[in-house]
Image (cartoon, rainbow, N blue to C red):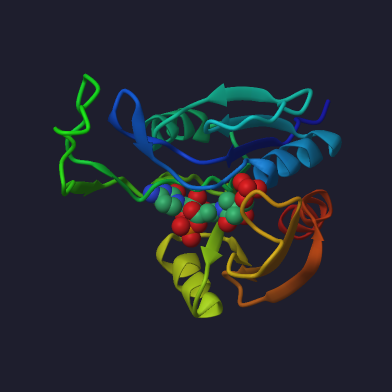
Amino acid sequence: MTKKIQCLISAGPTREWIDPVRFISNPSSGKMGYALAEEAVARGFEVDLVSGPVSLTPPPGVRLHRVVTADEMEKTMKELLDRAHLVIMTAAVCDHRPKKQWSEKLSKEDFPKNLEWVKNNDIVRGLSAARKNGQKIIGFAAETTDAMAHAAEKLATKGLDWIALNDVSQKGIGFASDFNDVTLLSSAGETIALGRETKKKTAQKILDRVWP
Ligand code: PMT
């Protein structure tokens, strides 16, 4: 019997808590990552879906791992890395978390005028540094300016095989939309525009390229 392709996908936002009732996050809905997970299952892959807080129903057949913070996402992705053939990091991970997290709700009066921040680890960079031969790692780049240059830099510095660039300053695509407009860049120098599509179709086109 041939061994099934193991696919590890992250989706959605992370939340970084200030106190028990307040956090910093971003508008990721999880739609792009869930579409990739659904398509990967349709192709017969076994899928671990590591999801930040979203309101989507997980696609049937995935192994769902719910996380909230970037730290939790990092820990879970690292635990699952070993068995993965293909890793796709669509999650919109918060780059920073508050230096201090209050264990009780801050009153309006006590809420600090300025917050200090610490950097979260770059999860996908850590995964690519730890990978074994043959594992493929795909990142996403959400950009608003100098999109191509920033995506190319992330592809190289994060040690990725492919990066899926979406210019999220474009109306009607990217965060929370049912549509996306992705350009794939590869470490081998390819640039492939997938065009404006539903996220379902975008997921199909991405998998056609990265795992033909
Ligand atoms: O969820 P949806 O509403 O469907 O929206 C989809 C999307 C816009 C979130 C998705 O298409 C997308 O662009 N995801 C990546 C968002 C992002 O965080 O991009 P970035 O350019 O900041 O990060 C680049 C890459 O590094 C990403 O693969 C990201 O997952 C990864 N990263 C970033 C920061 C961090 N601390 N660790 C990481 O691994």
Quadrant showing the C terminus: bottom right
Q: Residue furthest front?
A: 109
The image shows residue 46, relative to residue 9, as above or below, that is above
Q: Residue furthest top?
A: 104
Q: In the rendered image, which quarter is residue 193 located in? A: bottom right
Q: Residue at x 25, y 22 (%)?
A: 105
Quadrant showing the N terminus: top right
Q: Nearer the viewer, residue 105 or 99?
A: 105
Residue 15 % position (x, y): 41, 36
Residue 97 % position (x, y): 28, 42
For residue 36, side relative to residue 93 (left or right): right
Q: Residue at x 50, y 80 (%)?
A: 146
Residue 26 % position (x, y): 48, 47
Q: Residue at x 66, y 37 (%)?
A: 7
For residue 121, side relative to residue 77 (left or right): left
Q: Is residue 129 visible?
A: no
Q: Nearer the viewer, residue 87 or 201?
A: 201
The image shows residue 90, relative to residue 83, as above or below, that is below
For residue 77, side relative to residue 173 (left or right): left
Q: Nearer the viewer, residue 190 or 179?
A: 179
The image shows residue 125, relative to residue 68, as above or below, that is below
Q: Is residue 65 visible?
A: yes
Tally of numbered discs: 0
Residue 69 % position (x, y): 39, 33
